[in-house]
Amino acid sequence: MAKSSKGVLMGNAAIGQSGGPTAVINQSLVGVIEGLRGFAGVRKVYGMRHGVSGLIKSPPALVEVGRLSPAKLNAIARTPSSALGSSRDKPDAAYCGKILESCRAAEIRYFFYIGGNDSSDTCRIVSELAASTGYDMRCFHVPKTVDNDLVQSDHCPGFPSAARYVATAFMADNLDNASLPGVKINVVMGRHAGFLTAASVLGRRNRDDGPHLIYLPEVPFDNEGFVRDVQAVYDRLGRCQIAVSEGIQTSDGRPVAETLIDGLERDAHGNVQLSGVGGLGDALANVVKSRVKRSDGKPPRVRADTLGYLQRCWPDFSPVDAREARAAGKFAAKLAASGAASGSVALVRARGKAYKAVFERVELKEIAAKTRHMPAEFIDGRHGVTPAFVQYAAPLVGKLPEFARI
Amino acid sequence: MAKSSKGVLMGNAAIGQSGGPTAVINQSLVGVIEGLRGFAGVRKVYGMRHGVSGLIKSPPALVEVGRLSPAKLNAIARTPSSALGSSRDKPDAAYCGKILESCRAAEIRYFFYIGGNDSSDTCRIVSELAASTGYDMRCFHVPKTVDNDLVQSDHCPGFPSAARYVATAFMADNLDNASLPGVKINVVMGRHAGFLTAASVLGRRNRDDGPHLIYLPEVPFDNEGFVRDVQAVYDRLGRCQIAVSEGIQTSDGRPVAETLIDGLERDAHGNVQLSGVGGLGDALANVVKSRVKRSDGKPPRVRADTLGYLQRCWPDFSPVDAREARAAGKFAAKLAASGAASGSVALVRARGKAYKAVFERVELKEIAAKTRHMPAEFIDGRHGVTPAFVQYAAPLVGKLPEFARI
């Protein structure tokens, strides 16, 4: 019997985590588990090991998570990176057929997928396939991405904690750069959207604090302009701290990483590998070394760091982010319990002085496989961000450290 | 009058910060300032802007720091990176002559230099030069280095906080690597000494936690052994997290970075640039991609991060380190107040179950320009560290985050 006497769809639930982990993705996992408690439609709550790639295994790699103690759930929620394991698979129709087959076999009637825009697309395909084959299964997407590139939402769970790490990193590195002056390039995650790179400015407190130049994927990058920008800041301050998105592009849409480095790895989708490689920073450092001059004609001291995977897993999460990620999971569970057939969760910021956000259900097709970029009002010319961006992002990251000067 | 009626040497004091900054180097600065309070021999306390490079300027770049309020001093102490600015100058005899000249002109009778082994050597030369020219000036070195490579000390202020960052980074990255399995290489600071790279193990809690392989500068590195090690761990766990010191060397003493990368920058001392560049990690990643195989014969997913300058400036310092760095500065000031002619400060660990360290004066010539390495009892074979190292380092870094597993 798929329906109870009250008409509630009866079955098991499965929760998966997908794509790049974040510092708070387990908050969302725990939020779904907590949100399903007391809902009579769900018998067992399973976690998928490594997302849908575990689900389609024979036998499926599922672990029961519905009976974990509150203490254990709280400990998991505070742990960064996908506790169930993640997957980078991008299922096509045939793959989604296998997902559906596994769900039927395990009597899964409630399907939750925590991830970015690819994951919402997986949810959408599975949901449509289930409907077309007459298997009643409810599919819900819980948003997660450090890139902040999901449409329809004010911001995405995962972004505020990554932004907190990036802002703190630039604050500390700015002091390091001031103490041993030179040109310092820090490469920040974000293939298509510049939100995380923009977050580098959130700790600026004094007029001469870095970052002094910010290069976003949304603004075409050119070498000549870059060299001029760096020279101008260096002439003025004797140093220059630079935030560069890994996804910066030339005016014809080519990744700069691709134009400067030979033999970059490509993934299954034909994208060049941007994270987990230091090449872009090193290549830009070489541009500065060969083109920018000190007043004595010599090249300045130039260093490059690529902030790397710690941006998405550093365990000092934003309190707002932890709370919202948990609540987003709970909201998805409540959608299921209220009889919704499918949906994703959007965060909508309430008007007013104090920061507040509420959750809304959105259709999967509204966000599936779509990418949001930095809006024009957040971008200031060729190498800056606006006060409007700071106003937008500052409440999300929480209290940053305070530093003193002599 | 250089001496008071009681025979106390009268004059001004100057404090400088040198070399790579740390998260607690300002604790030592504040410690010296606090330690000099109430000492009748000192009239004014100056800070040198950018170490001796500021001192020898005309006019010398000095800032009075003796009258800063306790609140301001506490705020400075909590701020990472040299608040006075640092210098990488390595003074020779002529340069030290200029230092002495500036000291005479500014009536500096007490000279404090916070830094690593190069800075202790600067102290030594200045001290000897002062004595030989009949200028009574007392020179004190306050130890600071993230590399932990000063001789005579159990450990150095600055190391515990950097070790805390490295341990936390490996813990978080280990979760990231477990969630999206592959080979992950993290390059850690330390040109000659492997202490900081070894600290990558301090957060291991489960049998299969990373880092699974640790490569130190003290153990000759060879490509063939490296490939075999990675393949063995990957076959066993389906993933492999690797800690690599930036300073790893071949059996004939060449930096591996130099053997794998063309065109590396060299500094004034002929050393290749190891920090602020991602090349070593990328080169090792390419070795793994081309040589290590999954069971289906394809290369594994391989990523490399270079932890970079955040290791030495991340603002989440170790509480033990903050306390000891402050106390080391105070101890140096008290040496001066007690009439010592010169000296450096060593940290000696007291025997007993609970961690405790005390300070001792050591002669400048005992530590100047000498480098300490990881002792044999801390090194386990070709790619590991021993429980003795963990016992040594664990009390220094403070409480690490606790993570849960499903």
Image (spheres, coloured by chain):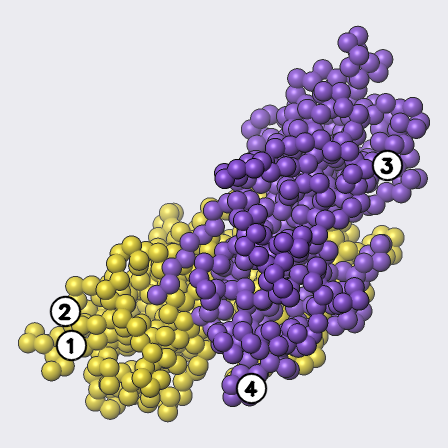
Chain colours: A yellow, B purple
Taking depth in this image into account, of B328 and A355 the one nearest to the observer is B328
The residue at the point 68 percent across, 45 percent down is: B145
Q: Please state which amino acid type lies under the numbered disc 1.
A: Met
Residue B298 circle label: 4
| Residue B190 shows in the view | yes
Report which residue position mark 2 lands on.
A40
Q: How far apart are marks 3 and 2 (CA)?
A: 80 Å
Residue A155, position as x, y percentages in the image: 42, 62
Report which residue position mark 3 lands on.
B125
Q: Please state which amino acid type lies under the numbered disc 2.
A: Ala
Q: Residues within 10 Å of mark 2 (few under 14, many from 20)?
A: few
Which sits earlier in the primary sequence, circle 3 or circle 4? 3
Q: CB atoms at circles 2 and 1 under 8 Å apart?
A: yes
Location of residue B360 with respect to B19 vertically, above or below = above
Location of residue B47 with respect to A356 vertically, above or below = above
- Marked residue chain, label 1: A
> In the structure shown, which secondary structural element does the residue marked by tag 2 occupy?
loop
> In the structure shown, which secondary structural element does the residue marked by tag 1 occupy?
loop
Please identify the quarter of the rendering in which residue A2 is found: bottom left
